[in-house]
Amino acid sequence: MTSLPSSSAPALQRSAIPGSYGWPVLGPLSDRLQYFWFQGPSSFFEKRIEKYNSTVFRTNVPPAFPFFGGVNPNVVALLDVKSFSHLFDMDLVDKTETLVGDFRPNLKFTGGIRVLPFLDTSDPKHTQIKNFCLDMLMRSSKTWAPTMVAALDATWDSIESKKGSTGSYLLPIQQSIFSFLSRSLIGADTSAVPEIHKSGHVMADKWIAFQYLPTISINRVQPLEELFIHSFSLPFWPIKSDYKKLEKFVEIQGKETLDRGQKDFGLTKEEALHNAISILAFSAYGGYVILFTQLLGNLATHKDVHAALRKEAREKIAENNGDLNFDAVRKMDLIKSFVYETLRFGPPIPSQFGRARKDFDLSSHDKVFEVKKGELLCGFQPVVMRDPKVFENPNEFVYDRFSCAKGGEELLKYLFWSNGPQSGTGPTASDKQCPAKDVVPLSGALLLAQLFQRYDEIEIKE
């Protein structure tokens, strides 16, 4: 591991930010096509690092042209660990409506309410809603692990009964994730509403897709994607009925949670309701589906590490009186490292944005740049998390990179998947770090440990 420059290092070279935004209309359109179609997001940023010999530069990011009124695609890209970390300093950056850049989906998708991900820390509502979310997690701490394990056991039982051990897992595990998160976070039992139990995860998928597809690279059916997905905001009406069903489900089945949001945190009923849906369907469900899918994909790719992971899982469960819970997985050094490396390789939310609150000096590893108030900063984590000045062999998946045996715990302060360092003291109501910063990796470890406890051999077909 290479350490970041210390405060005693020589003064960094001051430099103008390289790059450009190109001609109006043509520049953003060209960059959009490169980003989505001809290069792909990672290559888009990597090629510009090479071109400008800098991890900080000006460029455009989607969405852009022709039908995104009021959206400015101009950004300053931050693509190394040191420059990216400025996005966590709330004295320097404003996070108002910058979740996916200068674009915000229509408020109809969230009942006319600006939900937590689009609020800056200076907004009084941010503190109220973040504390509401943190309270949900605290109250679920004792039931989270057993609820998740029971849901996954039921999922594997179902898959085996229908198709045997080689059955498809994607849709069943999505259904399982939605059910256990509904129960754990908002106290809502999906089995009480058959349609939600069967299709709630599909409704959540569609709700997320119609909001964020204009910013997501798929690159499977070009040029149709550019014409029909990336050229304009998608409307709310096709998924309106599904969202109303999610509303009714949360309003009735999660009534106790919503009441607490109003009484204990000063939210209106509508604010509590639509933020609860956002927390459940977007922040929790959407993130867990990505993480669990990537964990299973990495297991499929790295079969050579199965024996070591299985041995550790079974030993630590046995030492915990045979109980699989968070106490057990906290002691699983290799399994936790596998999860952290998965989060490094494929952060669930790849891009982070923030708008400069004031003029300030921004440092990369080797240069200092002047950022002007109002400029939009953009960090792309799949590139940032491959910073060769921090991570050895950054493009390789090293399953034990974060293990104690390798001193990998020191690297956790550079693991930024949660919009903050994994080793930090957050999350708090005064930052934008994911409220589930600690719960998510433990849940990933629980998934792996449960698989290795249950199966002697695991064959996953991607």
Image: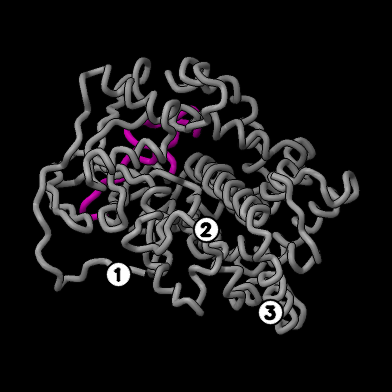
Mark 1 or mark 3, which has the lower sequence index? 1
Residue 202: horizontal and vertical position, in percent?
67, 35
Q: Nearer the viewer, mark 1 or mark 3?
A: 1
Q: Is residue 380 left or right of residue 332?
A: left
Q: Which residue is mark 2?
A: 397
Structural crowding at the residue carrying mark 3, measured as other residues with C-alpha within 10 Å and reported as few (<14), some (14–19) or many (≥20):
many
Whether residue 376 appears in this view of the structure is no
The answer for how far apart the CA atoms under marks 1 and 3 are is 32 Å
In the displayed structure, 132 sits above or below 139; it is above
Q: Residue at x 22, y 58 (%)?
A: 365
Residue 360: horizontal and vertical position, in percent?
13, 51
Structural crowding at the residue carrying mark 1, measured as other residues with C-alpha within 10 Å and reported as few (<14), some (14–19) or many (≥20):
few
Marks 2 and 3 close (CB-CB < 8 Å)? no
Please identify the residue farthest to the right as the structure is shown. 161
Query: Magenta residues, as a range?
Result: 88-115
Q: Looking at the image, which is closer to me, 382 or 328?
A: 382
In the displayed structure, 45 sits above or below 409; it is above
Q: Looking at the image, which is closer to me, 253 or 49?
A: 49
